[in-house]
Amino acid sequence: MSERTILLVEDNPNDEALTLRALKKSNILNPVVVARDGAEALDYLFSRGAQEGRKPAGNPEVVLLDLKLPKVDGLEVLRQLRADDRTKLLPVVLLTSSIEDQDLLRGYALGANSYVRKPVDFNQFVDAVKQLGLYWLVLNQRPPDSK
Amino acid sequence: MRLLSESLHDFAEATSDYPRLLSVIARRVAEIIGDVCIVLLLSDDKQSLEGTAYHDRDPEVARQYAALFERPLAIRDPTLAREAMQSGKPICIARLDIEQFRDRTTAESYELHRRIGAHGVLVVPLRVRNEPVGSISIVRYRPEHTPLDEIDVEVASNLANHAALAISNSRLLHRAQREIDRRVQAEAALFEAERLRRAEQDVARANRFLDAIIENIPDMVFVKDAATLAFTRFNRAGEELLGIEREQLLGKSDYDFFPPAEAEFFIQKDRETLASGTMLDIPEEPIQTARGTRWLHTKKVPILDGEGMPVYLLGISQDITERRSAEAQLLRAKEATEAANLELEAFSYSVAHDLRSPLRAIDGFSQALLEDYGAKLDGEGHSYLQRVRASAQHMAELIDDLLTLSRVTRAEMRGEWVELSDLARAIIAQLESFAPERRVNIVIGNGLRVSGDSGLLHILLENLLGNAWKFTSKRKDAHIELGVTEQDGGKVFFVRDDGAGFDMAYAGRLFGVFQRLHHVSEFEGTGIGLATVQRIVKRHGGRIWAEGGIDRGATFFFTLADEVTTP
């Protein structure tokens, strides 16, 4: 996949808008696909349902995953990704409001690559997104495509 | 004559021993005259004749005579002894016609004499001061023996006189002895009675003592007979508990007072206790009383005799009804608390998630407004939007601090060794990284090692050192120290600064939630930090207090329990 897509899984339109703004302000110009609940995210990642035969095909560069989601929650999405050969090595960053120990532990236990708490201060949020982009889209060597 | 004088000598010697004297007389007379000699004596009331001594060369014959006189003869029975005593003269039948003899003696006597073939009888009366006291009877039956003659009568009378005198003396002596014995015995009996009376008094005293103890024990005490399981002892606490007077209860069993199934249970436990020979503990048993169902914690103990056999069953029952319902209430309260805690947990979770997200929108879109439409706003417009952002961020801090406070209260404690010095250095390094321009002298004591939960202790130091850092921010050359001193033999840790300090008059309010002693314009903060610190210290079994003065700095002292155990 030539274009390094970012999949943002976020149900809150405000957070979606702010995240997109933060990406833009951080000069991250990669295409962003937004899934608004866990089921949509899984359909996209496994190219099924409405996303069957989607173009472009293939895995995104990184998934920014919220934990609290309608239908299928973030941890369940993560579990299914790690259970599937196609997505088990896909970088997943949990981007959430929660700093409850149990969420952190369960997130890492299910194989999250990072856990980032969304700060309230927008400037800090932009900083965080900038660092995420720098790390996952520039520095990090993605695993070889399993296809 | 030699035999005779020897006999008299023997009589004199035997005087002090009355029974022996009589047998000496019988033996001597039998030897001298022969064959059989019987000594009969008049009873004290003179109504009967008693055989007292018998002799014959052949012990079997002597025994037969003894058997004949086993029962005393009534004085009115026809006997030669009576005839001789009445007449005061010897009766001698030299050639006995056994059939004529029949009328002058008892049937048994006749029978014995006929059987052994008696052929001569001589009876001499024993008289003392002209009063008859008995007789000496001589029977000849051996075929080779010559018939009785005048000399035999003479010798027998002579012996009888001496024997009577000896008997009389001996009797007096014997009576005196008996009197002495009687008096000694009476005295001994008196002494024994006194001893018994004293022992009974002791037992009664011990019993009263025991009764007083049993009576005043606040638990029901009862004693049952091991064989019948009937009540034999019962105390006042028991009367009050069951509403049954002891007079009604004693001598009766459980079946008389309690429903059959309940009585059966009590009895079965009694039997178990008696069979095992050891104490039985019944932690909970219901009992029907005048006040309704009560619950008892009962101990049953077998009381054994010297051979280890149970004689009584002792029971002690504590009324645990109130305690039991209090425990049940406590359990319900605990369950309610746990449910409330779960609810709180869910609440905290949603606060963390849901309240922060609108704040993020408020802050983010305010910033977007500033960036994208800043040109269209004047200075006041900019300042308002900055206030909106600052408020949103302050509220986020409040939420975070409240969540920390709630987590500190709910979190499970881990007991581990924690190096406070290392924690403090890491916290200070972070504070310095946020404000590299500040000049602060930091002193951290070495090797401050405690037992506790490292996560909670980190929050504790973060707050105390953070406060010190914050309240010294207006000082050019600030000092902050973490150390330890001793007080009452225990370790007291302290965090000291030379910052803004506080008025000791308000020291009591320092640790309350949302209590602030400074204006937000002076020093920012949420007023939750010290409340969190206090909860952490309390959860570590310690104490916290503060000393300070306005512009003279503040010192926070805290103690921690020596060993924090994980629950």
Image (cartoon, coloured by chain):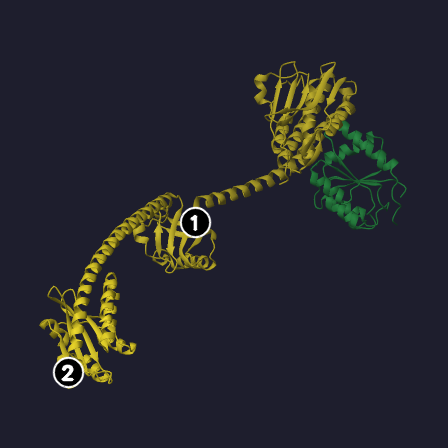
Chain colours: A green, B yellow
Residue sitting farthest toward the front? B1
Taking A43 as reference, is B486 left or right?
left
Residue at 60% in and 28% down? B543
Image spot of residue B188 (x, y percent): 27, 52
Disc count in the image?
A: 2
Task: Classify residue B556 by image quadrant.
Answer: top right
Task: Classify residue B360 by image quadrant.
Answer: top right
CA distance for labels 1 and 2: 91 Å
Q: Can you see residue B98?
A: yes
What's under tag 1, amino acid-wise?
Answer: Trp
Taking B314 as reference, is B331 left or right?
right
Work out whether disc 1 and disc 2 sit on a shared chain.
Answer: yes
Q: Which residue is mark 1?
A: B295
Residue sitting farthest toward the left? B87
Work out whether residue B151 or residue B324 is closer to the camera in this orientation and state it: B151
Tag shown at residue B509: none
Q: Which residue is mark 2?
A: B102
Work out whether residue A124 or residue A10 is closer to the camera in this orientation and state it: A124
Q: Can you see residue B524?
A: no
Q: Eyeballing the image, is B443 above or below B168?
A: above
